[in-house]
């Protein structure tokens, strides 16, 4: 199942595998797939995407910032830094991911590698009203597929 915004800039890919309780899970950020296709268990990821933290960072400022500037801002405050980190699933082990609510938008930033902020970065800023049904569909799919037979 692939669920994205109408422009394809943000979304999730979730697929059942032959192994019980294991799923393929990837993010679509900036229109590109993020993560690998290794099967993983998604309990923590489903909780995190359903309950993102709202940060009290200025949404007007964030709207004008690129990914490195947003990362620098998030690192400037421990509470922003800690609450925006998203260790979602094993399929994202080779990626660092941040996700948070800022004003009326959800912001996701990801980059490949072990050092955050180095190398290419992807960013998606999505209105909450577009994010909620996408995240809800993924969590509902996971919940139904994880239910005992």
Image (spheres, rainbow, N blue to C red):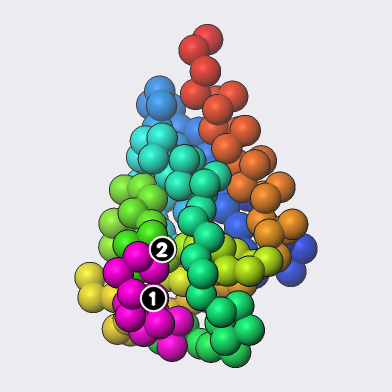
Instruction: Provide residue 98's location: percent of width, then percent of height.
Output: 42, 65
In the picture, residue 124 is in which quadrant?
A: bottom right
Q: What residue do we see at 29% from left, 83% from top?
A: 118
Q: Quadrant of the N terminus?
A: top right
Q: Which mark is residue 37?
A: none
**Mark 2 near mark 1, Cβ–Cβ under 8 Å?**
yes
Outermost residue toward the left? 114
Asked if the stretch drawn in magenta spans residue 71, the answer is yes
Which residue bears the numbered disc 2? Answer: 84
Decide whether residue 115 is among the magenta residues. no
Which secondary structure, mark 2?
helix
Q: Residue at x 57, y 37 (%)?
A: 139
Residue at image location 43% in from the left, 88% down from the top: 69
Q: Is residue 53 left or right of residue 87?
A: right
Q: Which residue position is annotated with label 1?
A: 74
Q: Which of 115/99 is in front?
A: 99
* Secondary structure that dominates the magenta span: helix
Q: Residue furthest front?
A: 56
- What span is in magenta? 69-80
Q: Position of residue 148 (x, y in %)?
A: 49, 12
Q: How many residues crowd around disc 2 within 10 Å: few (fewer than 14), some, or many (20 or more)?
A: many
Q: Tell me if 142 is positioned left or right of 95 in this view.
A: right
* Left-right relation of 65 to 5: left
Locate residue 19, reporting x and y percent: 38, 26
Q: Is residue 115 visible?
A: yes
């Amino acid at each position: 199942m692939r669920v994205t915004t109408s422009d394809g800039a943000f979304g999730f890919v979730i697929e059942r595998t032959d192994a019980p309780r294991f799923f393929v899970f990837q993010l679509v950020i900036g229109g590109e797939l993020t993560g690998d296709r290794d099967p993983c268990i998604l309990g923590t990821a489903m909780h995190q995407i359903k309950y993102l933290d709202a940060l009290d960072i200025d949404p007007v400022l964030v709207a004008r910032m690129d990914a490195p500037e947003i990362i620098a801002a998030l690192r400037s405050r421990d509470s922003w830094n800690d609450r925006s980190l998203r260790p979602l699933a094993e399929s994202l082990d080779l990626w660092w991911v941040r996700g948070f609510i800022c004003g009326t938008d959800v912001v996701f930033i990801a980059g490949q590698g072990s050092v955050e902020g180095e190398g290419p970065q992807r960013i998606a800023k999505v209105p909450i009203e577009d994010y909620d049904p996408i995240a809800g569909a993924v969590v509902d799919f996971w919940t139904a597929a994880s239910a005992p037979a």
